Image: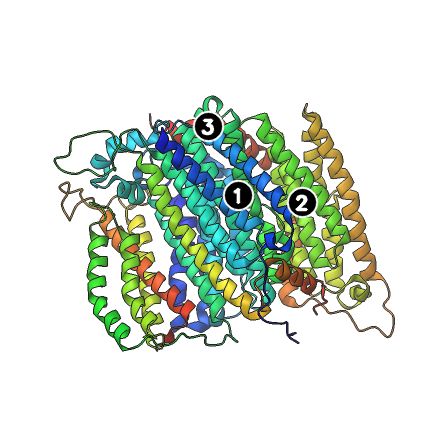
């Protein structure tokens, strides 16, 4: 019972921290770190959902007494989600490098304002 | 044409600008959201969530795929298509990052050489990392680990020397070749499964004895392809971010 | 009962094989890289057309990946709805293939992964697998948004990426909740369990989280702030493809979720409200937009809002109306984006554009008349289907939505006519001549205009086909039976 409470509370805490860092912070690096935190929250929640009372890791070992195993599907899903998150993070960092080089700032709001101004300028 | 904006503008964190009302509002919003989420999650009993598909897989995985590691049986068997998709995302991200960083007009932002000791140590680590990575990949269907974890270690083998001395050459051509053909191999193995009237990714070989290295049908082969692909992708991605020199 | 058709993996497998091989080919044969990519798209399109004709003649087909029976493994489910959008995506990718040769190999690779990911999105019958394919398409679109090489592209792409990933991660939380409540990820299995296990606050929250996640790509309000930025900064071809086809795939997936896993009035109401907000916000912003490119970006938000409104009406009539609106927009909007690529200046400086480029201006008028909904153009029939479905519904919020759509049509007509009257006004002698759309813009736009006219001629068979498609896509329990009861 206690374990479940701790796991759920930490997952939700991570989710909220991530949302805060993305929505309320202006620095692009903080936004991206927020994404990483948010993702770990989602992954932790998924793993917690797959836990079975008294279960052990879903790997068959010779000579082991057969007992309940935890649900293997969320573990597989989390593995997939981690790799997806890594790929997105790498692309985000590459883009941040170029934004910094071209705009000289990583302030999300300032970048957005300049972007809007540029799209208003006549291009022909 | 290109306007010059002041470089290095300092961004103050929100709270320090005296914007306490906004901070309080976001705290209130987050607290509400947290309460909502907590109530939702609490309606799923911890440790006793419905085990519907999971139970069926736990009972049948060993017999149907021959893998001892049931997570592997899911990753490469039951949900093999997810894994293909995941490798594809990594590939897509690497291609996009390469494209973004490769465009003209980018200054060479190279780090400094880390010195003789690090350089030597990086090269001494190289063979060990290769062996460990390969071991983790080919035992993925028996023990924890597999293509992704092993692939990441393989990438580290190639990337550690680059970290120690950023000027050392990195062979992007070989990385592209390995990456492309490993991905192709995954799909071709999947399509071969369709030859005998099966479906995409149907197992190719016999299941073998449980626990043996050569068991679990085509799963180890798929893991090998994933390991090579992930390894070359990560190494190539890191090299293009850190500006490793192209070796023709 | 339902034929197993392993070949429905090809629209995913072929483009991905092409994507893996293209960087290698581009290194040794840079001159041919673009052409090779186009060949892959054509081959995949031919195979998809064959599959579509088989689905059209002998009904939906199923393939269980790896041969693992339905709820355990991942299932592909190909019905008319899925095949229609797979074909539309192939056509879009072919038509808006990036220009250039080996130096543009990155963009070619991304186009192919977008094609494979998008096809998988339409075909997959598994909640998490759909998420994976959605992420493939999303990452490819982030890259394509930056593929123009300008600095605005990088800024628009990173902002798109942050919003998109926030959405997808929330969608992942939604998937976790669904799995925790039911223990399955298979949509057909969920169709059977949902009335009992998801008809509660947990189910509604999971749907809302999925709506936020997939709504980013579907340009649903309020997660569509990226659209005007990306469409303004990315190459016109990318804007045309994303607004035209990729956004439709996302909203079709939302429809699948709604029909199969969340058949509850509250979920429909949520989709309807975001649709209404999108229509209002989109058209008002389009009216005030600084140039045509931005106006079309905002109007695309409004058009997708209309599709969302239609999909929220329960029953096949709503699905048919939504599909008709989506198809019409998928033809018209890319053509608009191509025409407006050179006409990004404020309207005053476009005076007299019709004199220099009469063909482009004429096409602009035709497309405008159709999107406003002047009979007998297809746009009229799409809006008519929606109004008919709304009137037949007993839900008063839908009547309000219909009124909103009529009001939005007036606003849309006003700003389109403002642009047209500028084109046909006589230019002052001293003013510089407005730029002319080149052949690379006019070609795809003309092809789409011809498609629009063809659709006008074949309205009757097209309508019958869409109705049959909607009947098939709306029957949740029939779909569940086809996927789960195979061979028993």
- Label 3 belongs to which residue? C191
Q: Residue at x 39, y 41 (%)?
A: A44
Write down the residue under mark 2. C303
Q: Nearer the viewer, residue C409 or C460?
A: C409
* Along the viewing direction, whichever of C55 and C121 lies nearer the viewer: C121
Extreme residue in the top direction: C196
Disc 2 is placed on an element classified as helix
**Which of these two is toward me, A50 or C369?**
A50
Q: Secondary structure at mark 1?
A: helix
Q: Residue at x 57, y 30 (%)?
A: C267
Q: Quadrant of the C terminus of chain B?
A: bottom left
Of all chains, the one bearing label 3 is: C
Disc 3 packing (10 Å; few <14; some 14–19; many ≥20): many
**Mark 1 and mark 3: span between their CA atoms?**
21 Å
Would you name the residue on which mark 1 appears? C213
- Is residue A102 something one can see in this rendering? yes
* Label whose residue precedes the other's in the sequence (1 or 2): 1
Q: In the image, which disc is placed on residue C349?
A: none
For the residues labelled 1 and 2, the Cα–Cα distance comes to 19 Å
Compare marks 1 and 3 and give the one earlier in the sequence: 3
- The percent coordinates of residue C339 (x first, y second) are 69, 60
């Amino acid at each position: 019972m206690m374990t479940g409470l701790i796991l759920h509370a930490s997952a939700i805490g991570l989710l909220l921290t991530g949302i805060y860092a993305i929505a309320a912070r202006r620095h692009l690096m903080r936004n991206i770190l927020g994404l990483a935190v948010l993702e770990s929250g989602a992954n932790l929640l998924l793993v917690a959902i797959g836990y079975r009372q008294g279960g052990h890791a879903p790997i068959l070992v010779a000579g082991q007494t057969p007992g309940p195993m935890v649900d293997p599907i969320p573990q597989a899903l989390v593995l997939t989600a981690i790799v997806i998150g890594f790929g997105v993070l790498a692309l985000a960092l590459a883009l941040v490098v170029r934004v910094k080089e071209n705009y000289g700032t990583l302030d999300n709001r300032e970048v957005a304002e300049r972007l809007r101004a540029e799209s208003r300028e006549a291009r022909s | 044409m290109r306007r010059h904006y002041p470089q290095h503008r300092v961004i103050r964190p929100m709270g320090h600008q005296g914007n306490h009302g906004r901070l309080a509002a976001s705290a209130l919003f987050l607290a509400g959201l947290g309460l909502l989420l907590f109530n939702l999650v609490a309606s799923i009993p911890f440790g006793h969530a419905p085990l519907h598909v999971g139970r069926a897989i736990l009972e049948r995985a060993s017999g149907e795929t021959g893998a001892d590691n049931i997570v592997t049986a899911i990753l490469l068997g039951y949900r093999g298509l997810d894994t293909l998709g995941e490798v594809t995302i990594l590939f897509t991200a690497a291609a996009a990052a390469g494209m973004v960083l490769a465009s003209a007009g980018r200054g060479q932002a190279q780090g400094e050489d880390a010195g003789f000791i690090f350089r030597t140590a990086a090269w001494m680590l190289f063979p060990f990392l290769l062996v460990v990575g390969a071991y983790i990949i080919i035992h993925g269907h028996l023990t924890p680990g597999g293509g992704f974890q092993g692939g990441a270690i393989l990438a580290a083998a190639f990337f550690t020397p680059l970290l120690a001395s950023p000027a050392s050459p990195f062979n992007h051509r070989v990385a592209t070749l390995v990456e492309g053909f490993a991905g192709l191999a995954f799909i071709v193995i999947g399509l071969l499964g369709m030859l005998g009237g099966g479906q995409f990714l149907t197992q190719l070989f016999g299941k073998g004895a449980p626990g043996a290295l050569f068991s679990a049908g085509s799963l180890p082969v798929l893991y090998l392809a994933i390991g090579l692909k992930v390894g070359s992708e990560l190494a190539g991605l890191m090299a293009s971010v850190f500006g490793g020199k192209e070796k023709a | 009962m339902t034929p197993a058709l392993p070949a429905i993996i090809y629209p995913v497998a072929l483009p991905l094989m092409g994507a893996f091989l293209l960087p290698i080919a581009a290194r040794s044969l840079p001159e041919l890289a673009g052409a090779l990519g186009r060949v892959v798209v054509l081959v995949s399109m031919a195979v998809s057309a064959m599959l579509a004709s088989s689905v059209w003649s002998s009904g939906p087909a199923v393939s269980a990946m790896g041969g693992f029976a339905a709820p355990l493994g991942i299932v592909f489910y190909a019905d008319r709805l899925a095949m229609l959008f797979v074909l539309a995506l192939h056509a879009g990718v072919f038509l808006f293939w990036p220009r250039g040769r080996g130096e543009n190999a990155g963009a070619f690779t991304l186009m192919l992964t977008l094609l494979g990911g998008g096809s998988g999105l339409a075909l997959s019958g598994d909640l998490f697998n759909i998420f994976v394919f959605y992420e493939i398409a999303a990452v490819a679109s982030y890259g394509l948004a930056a593929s123009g090489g300008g600095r605005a592209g990088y800024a628009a792409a990173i902002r798109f990426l942050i919003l998109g990933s926030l959405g997808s991660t929330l969608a992942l939380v939604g998937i976790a909740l669904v799995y925790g409540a039911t223990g399955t990820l298979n949509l057909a299995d969920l169709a059977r369990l949902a009335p009992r296990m998801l008809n509660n606050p947990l189910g509604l929250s999971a749907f809302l989280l999925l709506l936020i996640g997939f709504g980013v790509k579907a340009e649903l309000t309020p997660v569509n702030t990226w659209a005007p930025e990306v469409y303004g900064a990315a190459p016109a071809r990318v804007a045309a493809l994303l607004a035209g086809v990729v956004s439709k795939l996302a909203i079709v997936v939302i429809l699948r979720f709604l029909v199969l896993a969340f058949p509850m009035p509250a979920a429909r109401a949520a989709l309807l409200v975001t649709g209404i907000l999108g229509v209002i916000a989109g058209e008002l912003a389009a009216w005030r937009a600084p140039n045509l490119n931005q106006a079309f970006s905002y109007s695309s938000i409004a058009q997708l809002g209309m599709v969302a409104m239609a999909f929220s009406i329960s029953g096949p009539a709503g699905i048919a109306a939504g599909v008709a609106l989506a198809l019409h927009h998928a033809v018209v909007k890319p053509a608009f984006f191509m025409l407006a690529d050179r006409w990004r200046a404020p309207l005053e400086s476009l005076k007299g554009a019709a004199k220099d480029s009469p063909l482009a201006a004429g096409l602009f008028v035709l497309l405008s008349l159709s999107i406003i909904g002047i009979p007998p153009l297809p746009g009229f029939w799409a809006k008519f289907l929606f109004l008919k479905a709304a009137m037949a519904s007993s839900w008063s919020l839908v009547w309000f939505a219909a009124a909103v759509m009529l009001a939005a049509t007036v606003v849309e007509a006003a700003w389109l006519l403002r642009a047209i009257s500028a084109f046909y006004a006589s230019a002052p002698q001293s003013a510089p001549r407005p730029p002319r759309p080149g052949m690379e813009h006019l070609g795809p736009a003309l092809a789409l205009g011809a498609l629009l006219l063809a659709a006008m001629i074949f309205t009757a068979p097209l309508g019958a086909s869409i109705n049959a498609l909607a009947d098939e896509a709306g029957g949740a329990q029939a779909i569940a039976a086809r996927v789960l009861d195979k061979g028993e």
